[in-house]
Structures are given as structure tokens and as C-alpha cells.
């Protein structure tokens, strides 16, 4: 049995770009879709031989909006992946979609081709909030898309929600969560709105528009965590909740530091001990793949010490958390300074310990960036304190 590998395929096309979005996505580029399909297929054919001995157990079509790429192209793409890679029989195959472009015909076609998980961008049940960030759909289209998915026999449905939207209050957030629960998804991803530099939303804020503040977002988050728990959705990552057996296996690869490869402009990979990404430009990507040019924009070999930092940064996003001997064994680093800091977090209600495993609490998740940053600093100091005496003894430093 081969080692397991995830595959991510970026579909950068959108009908329109939302005001908060900083992902690499492009509206009004339908004319390049066929050339992009050719480039992806060529890239898959070129890359697959490097992955012999690996079994692909997750495939994720993200965007952009994969549902605007068209069923025929999506089916061709998935068939090529299956043809070139050793895809397991039980592979999780996810396709993102937006409600306005996820009709029954499209969903039936991709489900028959092997897609068994749909991630639908609901975002809100309040039409005014959707319009405020220039989403193209309304809530009625969400319900129609969910109905179409069920009729297409999609049995694993995830809904995306956003809290902190312009004009959103606790009551409207509660309405959105309850509406999502009524649609009976297997999985929910609930993200706090972030104002990314350079986005239209950033410009609106710079001109004085007021959004729900950090305290309001915190109240929304903690209420949501409690409500979803009572509804049977276990929190397994800061923003992700699932019924038993329906955690996103692909996204868990990112958080657990497992290998994956990406295809498409701006796509990232972590494979063979090396992390790399492709040029974040659709035309340059197509030209490089079809014309034989350079397509990798950044590439770096990741040393063990940096992997140890990633272990802290990514695992503490999850309910699984971190474990002392797991850390010592994999990265040969001293856990004692980290444990002292984690005990401080525990006293403040930000972390919890079960046996030797530590995880952040929902209150800790709210400030996880700062908590993890402090642990990473401690890790760096501890590593230097361990390494410097050896280097001095070897005469490499004074």
C-alpha cells in the first residue's frame, strides 16, 4: 500500500469577484477556459510520474468557482486525474460551488464522474448581507442548490458561512446559522470576515465604513461553537465543524502537515520535503505549461526545525492539538518551555490538557494567532539555547 497524497486543483474563474475576496480568481475570462483545461491536463500528465508509489486519497477542486468551469471540463479533468494517478477507491473528492451556478445537471454530472463531496458558498441567509459584499446569489438560490445536490445524490454536503459581514448583528448571524442547520449539511465551515489589503472591502473600510468589531465577532463565534455542538457538529478545527465521519479529509492534510500537490496558478504544494508554488497569473501559467517555460514561482526545502514550527502552528488550529512525545520524537526539540506556557494558557482558560495532549479552547481559538506566536518564539529561544553550546564547542561560533 502506497503513501497517501492529496491533490488540489485550482479553478480561478468566477462570474464576479466578491468585495472581501483576495484569492486568485478572475471574472470575465470564459474565453481561456479551454486553453486552461489543456494546460491542467498537460501539467497532470507531466507530474504524475513523479508520484509513483503514492496513493491519492483526496482530490479538491477549489477556486474561484469550479462550478462555472462547466460540467464537461470538470469531468474531463477528473478522468485525467484518475487515469494518471493511483486514486484510492474511497478517495474523498470535493468540488466547491456557488449557489447560482450549482444546478442539478452540473451536480449530477460531476457526482457520476466521482465527486462525492460538495462545498457550497452559502455565506449568509440574509439577502441584504449577501448584497452588501456583492454575492450573486440570494438565500432562495441556496435552498435550490441544496435541493439539487440531494437530488443528484450528493451525500456529503458542506456549507460555508461568514460572520462579521457588513450590517450583520447577532440576531441575523443566529438566523443564518439556524437556516444552515435546517438544510442538514454534514459539514459547516464558519469564517470570521477578514479585511484583506487591496480588496474592495478594504477600500470601503478606509473610506469609513464600520464593520462588526472584534468583540462582536467573538460573541458570534462563541455562540456559534456552542450552538453547533448542541446540534451534533463537533468542532475539529478553528473554523470547521462536522457530523461524525464527515471531517474534511483533504483540509486535514494541510493542518496535520501531510503531503499534497497543487495544480493551477497560485496553487501550493508540499511534497518530497519541499514546499513550492506556481506563478499567480493565468496567462503565464497556460503559456509556461503549454510552451515549456518555467511555472514554479517559489520553492524551498523545509528543514526539520521549521517543520517543528509548522507542527505547532497548524496542529494547534485543530481539536487534536499537540502532544509532548510526538513533538520530541519527530523534531528532537525540548517541550518543557512550551508546556510551561501552555500551563499558563490553561489557567487563563485558553488551553486544555487531556493526558499528554494539549489543545486550544474556543476562547483560545479566538486569540490563537497571538498564543501560537508566543509559543514559536519560545521554541526559537529554546533551540538557540540548545544549539549554541554545541557550536561553541565545535569552534563554529565564539
Image: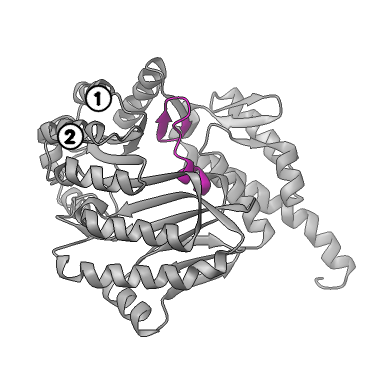
Image quadrant in which you'd find residue 13:
bottom left
Where residue 82 appears, as percent x and y from the top left, is 43, 57
Name the secondary structure under disc 1. loop
- Is residue 8 in view from this perspective? yes
Q: How is the image coloured?
A: one colour
Q: Position of residue 304 (x, y in %)?
A: 68, 58
Mark 2 surroundings: few (<14), some (14-19) or many (≥20) residues within 10 A: many
Residue 394 picture quarter: bottom right
Measured in 3D between alpha carbons, the distance from the residue under mark 1 to the one under mark 2, in whole angstroms, is: 9 Å
Residue identified by numbered label 2 = 142
Residue at left 75%, top 39%? 325
In the displayed structure, does residue 277 sit left or right of residue 214? right
Q: Are marks 1 and 2 in contact (CB under 8 Å)?
A: yes
Q: Is residue 198 visible?
A: no
Residue 325 inside the magenta-drawn segment:
no
As drawn, is 57 to the left or to the right of 336?
A: left
Residue 396's label in the rendered image is none
Q: In the rendered structure, which disc, 1 or 2, sits on the residue that comes first in sequence?
A: 2
Of residue 367 and residue 233, the one placed in the foreground of this image is 233
Q: Position of residue 20 (x, y in %)?
A: 23, 49
Based on the picture, tell me whether residue 241 belongs to the magenta stretch. yes
- Rendering coords of residue 370 (x, y %): 50, 42
| Tag 2 secondary structure | helix
Q: Nearer the viewer, residue 147 or 232?
A: 147
Decide: few, some or many residues near mark 1? Use Cα within 10 Å; few <14, some 14-19, many ≥20. some
Name the residue at 34% across, 32% down: 155
Range of the magenta residues? 236-254
Q: Is residue 288 above or below residue 389?
A: below
Quadrant the C terminus occupies: bottom right
Q: Residue at x 62, y 63 (%)?
A: 273
Name the residue carrying label 1.
183
Amino acid at each position: 500500500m502506497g503513501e497517501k497524497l492529496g491533490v488540489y486543483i485550482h479553478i480561478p474563474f468566477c462570474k464576479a469577484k466578491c468585495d472581501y475576496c483576495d484569492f486568485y480568481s478572475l471574472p470575465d475570462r470564459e474565453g481561456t477556459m479551454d486553453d486552461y483545461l489543456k494546460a491542467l491536463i498537460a501539467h497532470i500528465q507531466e507530474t504524475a510520474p513523479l508520484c509513483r508509489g503514492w496513493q491519492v486519497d483526496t482530490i479538491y477542486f477549489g477556486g474561484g468557482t469550479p462550478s462555472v468551469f462547466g460540467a464537461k471540463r470538470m469531468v474531463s479533468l477528473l478522468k485525467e486525474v484518475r487515469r494518471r494517478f493511483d486514486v484510492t477507491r474511497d478517495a474523498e473528492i470535493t468540488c466547491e460551488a456557488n449557489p447560482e451556478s450549482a444546478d442539478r445537471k452540473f451536480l449530477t454530472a460531476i457526482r457520476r464522474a466521482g465527486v462525492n463531496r460538495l462545498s457550497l458558498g452559502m455565506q449568509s441567509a440574509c439577502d441584504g448581507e449577501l448584497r452588501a459584499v456583492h454575492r450573486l446569489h440570494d438565500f432562495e438560490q441556496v435552498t435550490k442548490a441544496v435541493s439539487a445536490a440531494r437530488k443528484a445524490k450528493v451525500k456529503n454536503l458542506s456549507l460555508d458561512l461568514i460572520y462579521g459581514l457588513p450590517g450583520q448583528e447577532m440576531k441575523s448571524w443566529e438566523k443564518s446559522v439556524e437556516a444552515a442547520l435546517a438544510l442538514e449539511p454534514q459539514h459547516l465551515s464558519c469564517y470570521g470576515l477578514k479585511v484583506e489589503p487591496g480588496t474592495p472591502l478594504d477600500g470601503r473600510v478606509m473610506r469609513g465604513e464600520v464593520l462588526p468589531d472584534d468583540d462582536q465577532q467573538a460573541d458570534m463565534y462563541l455562540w456559534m461553537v456552542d450552538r453547533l455542538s448542541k446540534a451534533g457538529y463537533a468542532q475539529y478545527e478553528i473554523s470547521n465543524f462536522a457530523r461524525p465521519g464527515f471531517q474534511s479529509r483533504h483540509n486535514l492534510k494541510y493542518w496535520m502537515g501531510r503531503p499534497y500537490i497543487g495544480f493551477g496558478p497560485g496553487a501550493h504544494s508540499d511534497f518530497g520535503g519541499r514546499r513550492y508554488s506556481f506563478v499567480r497569473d493565468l496567462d503565464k501559467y497556460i503559456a509556461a505549461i503549454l510552451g515549456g517555460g518555467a511555472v514554479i514561482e517559489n520553492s524551498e526545502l523545509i528543514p526539520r526545525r521549521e517543520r517543528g514550527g509548522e507542527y505547532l502552528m497548524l496542529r494547534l488550529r485543530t481539536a487534536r492539538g499537540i502532544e509532548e512525545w510526538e513533538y520530541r520524537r519527530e523534531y528532537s526539540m525540548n517541550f518543557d518551555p512550551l508546556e510551561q506556557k501552555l500551563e499558563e494558557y490553561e489557567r487563563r482558560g485558553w488551553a486544555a490538557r487531556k493526558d499528554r495532549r494539549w489543545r486550544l479552547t474556543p476562547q483560545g481559538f479566538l486569540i490563537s494567532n497571538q498564543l501560537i506566536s508566543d509559543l514559536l518564539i519560545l521554541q526559537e529561544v529554546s533551540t538557540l539555547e540548545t544549539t549554541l553550546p554545541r557550536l561553541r564547542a565545535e569552534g563554529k561560533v565564539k
